[in-house]
Image: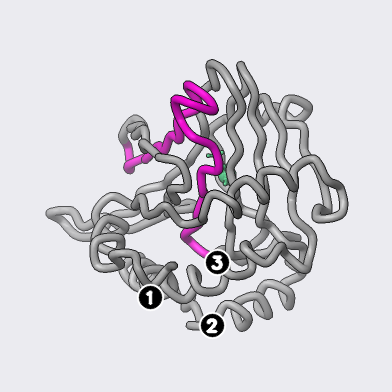
């Protein structure tokens, strides 16, 4: 499925604006099976009620290892596609970090740094729920891109609940972008910093992401983060 995506366009958009939409990535059966897992306990290591932490309203659950097959089938291949972008960003920002081509090798680095808990997650929002602007950083070891896949149909399963990205440019106020997603679409986006080519050289912008309040219905998403957590 990943091979069918237009990676030339995706890479160009990641380079120019720090995010790209691709998809649909999962078939209908897999999408509903994944969303349905939410009600089970065994596939997960923890559950977070966002309101308790000031993260927003709604809840999410981190998968445990081994990840469900459709998540495993996406995580390493997406990483392999995105590692060259991550390396170009690191070199443009004059950072020493380089990312191996292979996700298993990157996970070894995470684990050696004490980050061994899986980060892929399922999120569930009902009416009035939202996700505050945040960054998914779980330790020193960070892969600079992540992916979220919409498992529900906007306009049908839910209304509101838009995926929002903000960009903080040096010495400027933040700018917000609403990323329109269709059912099954993936948004690939910067976790934190990315380089922007200015007229006087490269500067760094910082991103955060979140979800605007759901007005009606139920919205599920699958989040794929490539670094593991401490
Ligand atoms: O529900 C969403 O669209 C955002 C999910 C999220 O914050 C993530 O995948 O890290
Ligand atoms: Fe997130």
In the image, what residue occupies the spot 45% across and 35% down?
163
Secondary structure of the residue carrying tag 2 is loop
> For the residue with label 3, is its CB less than 8 Å from the closest atom of ligand 1?
no
Q: Which residue is mark 3?
A: 74
Task: Identify which residue, 230 or 214, lies in the foreground.
Answer: 214
Which stretch is magenta? 143-171
Q: Position of residue 210 (x, y in %)?
A: 52, 35
| Closer to the eye: label 3 or 2 | 3
| Closer to the eye: label 1 or 3 | 3
Instruction: Using residue 147 as the reference point, say whether residue 220 is left or right of it.
Output: right
Secondary structure of the residue carrying tag 1 is helix
**Disc assigned to residue 142:** none
Q: Which residue is mark 2?
A: 102
| Quarter of the picture holding the N terminus | bottom left
Say which quarter of the image contains residue 141.
bottom right
Above or below, comparing residue 112 to residue 193 in the picture: below
Above or below, comparing residue 155 to residue 141 in the picture: above
Instruction: Using residue 93 as the reference point, say whether residue 27 is left or right of it.
Output: right
Mark 3 and mark 2 lie on one chain; the one further toward the N terminus is 3
In the image, what residue occupies the spot 54% across and 37% down?
152
**Disc assigned to residue 84:** 1
Mark 1 and mark 3 lie on one chain; the one further toward the N terminus is 3
Q: Position of residue 224 (x, y in %)?
A: 58, 57
* Quarter of the displayed picture in which ligand 1 can be seen: top right
> For the residue with label 1, is its CB less than 8 Å from the closest atom of ligand 1?
no
The number of callouts visible is 3
Q: Position of residue 3 (x, y in %)?
A: 38, 72
Q: Position of residue 54 (x, y in %)?
A: 70, 27
């Amino acid at each position: 499925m990943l091979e069918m995506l237009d990676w030339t366009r995706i890479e160009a958009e990641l380079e120019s604006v720090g995010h790209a939409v691709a998809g649909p990535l999962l078939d209908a059966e897999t999408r509903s099976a994944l969303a349905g897992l939410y009600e089970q306990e065994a596939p997960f290591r923890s559950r977070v009620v966002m309101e308790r932490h000031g993260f927003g309203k709604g809840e999410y659950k981190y998968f445990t290892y081994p990840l469900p097959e459709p998540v495993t089938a996406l995580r390493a291949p997406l990483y392999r596609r995105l590692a060259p972008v991550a390396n170009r960003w690191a070199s443009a920002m004059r950072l020493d970090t380089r990312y191996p081509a292979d996700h298993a090798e990157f996970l070894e680095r995470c684990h050696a740094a004490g980050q061994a808990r899986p980060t892929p997650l399922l999120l569930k929002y009902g009416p009035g729920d939202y996700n505050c602007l945040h960054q998914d950083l779980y330790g020193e070891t960070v892969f600079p891109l992540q992916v979220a896949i919409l498992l529900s149909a906007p306009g049908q399963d839910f209304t509101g609940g838009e995926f929002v990205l903000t960009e903080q440019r040096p010495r400027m106020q933040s700018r917000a972008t609403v990323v329109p997603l269709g059912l099954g679409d993936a948004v690939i986006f910067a976790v934190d910093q990315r380089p922007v080519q200015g007229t006087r050289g490269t500067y760094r912008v910082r991103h955060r992401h979140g979800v605007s309040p759901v007005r009606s219905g139920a919205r599920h998403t699958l989040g794929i983060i490539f670094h593991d957590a401490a």
